[in-house]
Amino acid sequence: MMVQIAPSILSADFLHLYKDVELVNAEADLFHLDVMDGTFVPNISFGFPVVEAIAREARKPLDVHLMIVHPEKYVERFAKAGADMISFHYEAAQDESDAVINLIRRFHVKAGIVINPDCPVEKIFPYLPKVDFILVMSVFAGFGGQAFIETTYGRIRAVQAELDRIGSPALIEVDGGVGPANAAALVEAGASILVAGSSVFRASDPAAAIAAMRLA
Ligand code: DX5
Ligand code: ZN
């Protein structure tokens, strides 16, 4: 399985979104779009119009990471805005996680469940047979540019071990503080989708930064 690199648009220049999408359109595997509501996380990012605009220009699938309460209310609109993958936080959905996964699937969108660094990985084990991917946060959701939390490696290994045990082909995505320095170790631990915001868009050559992570 080849690693997929997903640049996070949260770190792009919002005044020149077209230019930044173009900068990585050839080299990226996915576009990672962070939707924050100011309630589930203490930050507000962007919503439907921005996702729709990026969908018009992006040549790669859109990976929408919902950091919002009541994700079930907005799945349909993000699917219609162009999402190819939608992930929601287990902490936001809890016992409704099964229903949210079913809802995402109903729109023929890949479904992912996300956990913050302080959520025991076992909490999401019941949902692993149903998801297409698991997003293991390596920072607390809410802001770009935070330092990578080292305990993430063990958490990825634990999720991968459970996926192996149940025979699931679901992919593990990792998000927060990811760059060329830790890409290889994350892939070795079991991650196959690497989200990278500042390490891509703060680099002098964003496409080269993506290529460096792929080769790491
Ligand atoms: C944080 C977001 C991330 C963020 C990553 O809540 O989920 O996707 O953009 O940014 P970096 O790569 O700078 O840590
Ligand atoms: Zn994200």
Image (cartoon, helix red, strand yellow):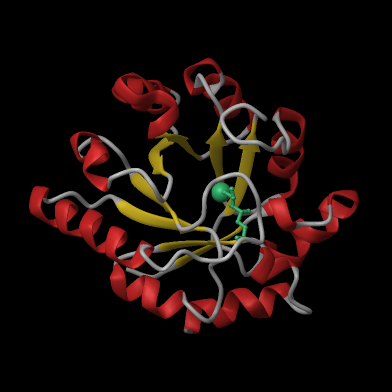
Quadrant the N terminus occupies: bottom left
Name the side, left or right, on which 83 lies relative to 162.
right
Name which quarter of the figure residue 190 lies in.
Answer: bottom left
Residue 36 at x, y = what percent?
A: 64, 35
Q: Nearer the viewer, residue 40 or 3?
A: 40
* Residue 61 makes an appearance in the image: no
Image coordinates of residue 115 in percent, x first then y, are 39, 43
Q: Position of residue 98 (x, y in %)?
A: 29, 24
Which of 54/11 is in front? 11
Q: Residue at x 66, y 55 (%)?
A: 144
Foreground of the two, 199 or 86? 199
> Left or right: where does residue 39 sit relative to residue 57?
left
Residue 76 visible at all = yes
Q: Which residue shows up at 63% across the image and 55% down it? A: 8
Q: Please, which residue is most extreme toward the left here?
A: 165
Residue pictured at 50% horizontal, 19% vertical: 70
Report which quarter residue 55 is drawn in: top right
Q: Position of residue 86 (x, y in %)?
A: 48, 36
Looking at this rendering, what residue extends furthest in the right direction?
Answer: 15
